[in-house]
Image (cartoon, helix red, strand yellow):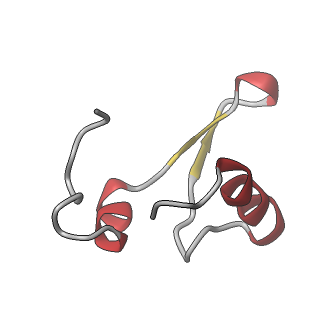
Amino acid sequence: MRGILPASIRTAVWRRGHFMNIVPIKTGSGKSARLLWPAAQVDALLPPELAGEGAA
């Protein structure tokens, strides 16, 4: 998923509530809010050589 800007992901979630049919889980509120993405669904979108890699 190279070439996708973080702002594009945030905009899609803000407008549609999902990005590529993956719905994030919002934690917290206000400026401390974070989005958690289901790892299994994200891995399913990635090519096999990148799926399951940690944050390197």
* Position of residue 37 in the picture relative to residue 41 (left or right): right
- Residue in the image at 59% along x and 60% along y: 4
The x, y position of residue 19, in whole percent, is 61, 68
The N terminus sits in image quarter: bottom left
**Residue located farthest toward the bottom when viewing the structure as drawn:** 21
Image position of 20 with respect to 17: above or below: below
* Position of residue 19 in the picture relative to residue 10 (left or right): left
The answer to which of 18 and 56 lies nearer the viewer is 56
The x, y position of residue 26, in whole percent, is 63, 44
Examine the image and state in which quarter residue 20 appears.
bottom right
The x, y position of residue 6, in whole percent, is 65, 49
- Residue in the image at 78% along x and 59% along y: 11
**Residue located farthest toward the top when viewing the structure as drawn:** 32
Image position of 30 with respect to 36: above or below: above
The C terminus sits in image quarter: top left
The x, y position of residue 33, in whole percent, is 69, 31
**Residue located farthest toward the front when viewing the structure as drawn:** 3
- Residue in the image at 29% along x and 63% along y: 43
How many numbered discs? 0
